[in-house]
Amino acid sequence: MSKILREKKKSNEYFEVLLANLTMEELIALKLELALQQNPAFIGLPVWKATPKFVRDAMFKAALGIAGTKKGAMRILGMNVKTFKNYLNKLDILTYYKEKGDDTN
């Protein structure tokens, strides 16, 4: 994920150091706050209900980015092959990586 975001000029080493000093809760709260400030149309959307999908999506992207392979990501997430493939297809994560030019196998 870091590599993809850096290539898109959405991240850099300094930014990542700052992010690393935030708790996950602080990061999510800040992102939601900024999204609502920039686009008030988000107000009223079912954010609470959608949160599990956001978290799963982020976990898969992080695991694939760290591990670099599906097998490694399965180990990080503690999932068996069937469960992993089910979520992988549901969340369409591989399409994200392929669109970004990353060949995560």
Image (tube, rainbow, N blue to C red):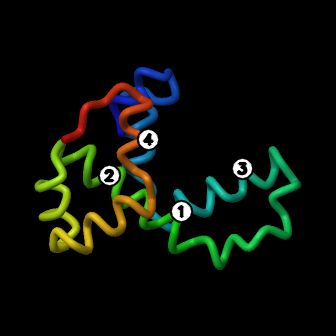
Mark 1 lies on a secondary structure that is helix
Question: What's the residue type where badge 3 is placed?
Answer: Leu
Which circle's residue, 3 or 4, is located before the other in the chain? Answer: 3
Disc 4 designates what residue? 96
Give SS at disc 4.
helix
At mark 3, the secondary structure is helix
| Few, some or many residues within 10 Å of mark 1 (<14, 14–19, 20+) | few
Give residue 16's position: percent from left, percent from top: 40, 38
Comes first in the chain, label 2 or label 1: 1
The residue pinned by badge 1 equals 26
Find the distance from the CA under tag 1 to the CA under tag 4: 25 Å
Neighbor class of circle 4 (other Cα within 10 Å; few <14, some 14-19, many 20+) is: few
In whole angstroms, how far apart are the C-alphas of marks 2 and 1?
A: 18 Å
Is residue 23 in sight in this rendering? no
- Mark 2 closeness class: few <14, some 14–19, many ≥20 residues within 10 Å: some
Whole-percent x, y for residue 46 in the image: 74, 73
Q: Quadrant of the C terminus?
A: top left
Instruction: List x then y, in percent, for residue 29.
Output: 61, 63
What residue sits 23% from the left and 39% below the top? Answer: 104
Question: Dividing the image into 4 quarters, which one contains the N terminus?
Answer: top left
For marks 1 and 3, the one nearer the N-term is: 1
Which residue is the site of mark 3? 34
In this rendering, the label closer to the viewer, 3 or 2? 2
The residue mark sitting in front, 2 or 4, is 4
Mark 3 and mark 4: Cα distance apart in space: 23 Å
Q: Choose mark 3 or mark 4, whichever is in front.
A: 4
CA gap, disc 1 and disc 3:
12 Å
For the point 45% across and 34% down, the residue is: 15
Up the image or down, 99 lies above or below 74; here it is above
The circle on residue 62 is 2
Depth check, mark 1 against mark 3: the one in front is: 3
